[in-house]
Image (spheres, rainbow, N blue to C red):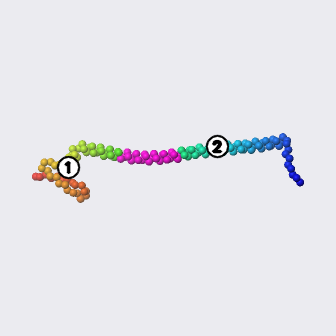
Amino acid sequence: MNKKVVKLLNSYTKKKETEKKVLSDESRVSRKRTLLFGSIMLVIAGILLVIALHQNHQNSYLEEELAANEERLDNKITESQDLEQKIKQLNDDDYIMRIARSEFFLSEEGEIVFNLSDDNNDEPVTEESKFGE
């Protein structure tokens, strides 16, 4: 028994074959479209990921720079306050007189200056005494 299949060439079989071919073509086109749009979405997601990582790195760098600048600003403010205090002191005659007496051993007429060391502090302390009192 030899089995040979012969295709019928009538309108029904032709219609079914064309429908089958159209469906396979549509399926192939659909897969290509899905692959194309999927790859486009992956490229866009990759670009967005790279941008996000770059922004994260940039933000951390700027935060470090901001912290360093804030520290320098605090130092400058402290220095400015110290200098303003020094200006106030230098405008005070009593302060200048104390500095002149302690640093340069200036004394008034008839006055003797003694340098005594303090137990709590290693810096010399000046005391004044006058003859005749």
Tell me which residue sits at (59%, 43%) in the image: 44
Q: Which residue is mark 2?
A: 37
- Whether 72 is among the magenta residues is yes
Give the left or right position of residue 29, taking residue 107 as reference: right
Label 2 element class: helix
**Residue 110 versus residue 68: which sits nearer the camera?**
68
Mark found first going from the N terminus, 2 or 1: 2
Amino acid type, callout 1: Phe
Give the left or right position of residue 109, taking residue 44 as reference: left
Give the left or right position of residue 36, taking residue 100 as reference: right
Mark 2 → mark 1, Cα distance in angstroms: 87 Å
Label 1 element class: helix
Determine the residue located farthest toward the right in the rendered image. 1
Which numbered tag is attached to residue 66?
Answer: none
Q: Which residues are magenta?
A: 52-75
Give the left or right position of residue 13, taking residue 93 as reference: right
Instruction: Let me know if residue 44 appears in the view.
Output: yes
- Whether 23 is among the magenta residues is no
Q: Which residue is mark 1?
A: 104
Tell me which residue sits at (37%, 45%) in the image: 73
Tell me which residue sits at (49%, 47%) in the image: 57
Alpha-carbon neighbours of circle 2 within 10 Å: few (<14), some, or many (≥20)?
Answer: few
Residue 19 x %, y %? 78, 42
Residue 76 x %, y %? 35, 45
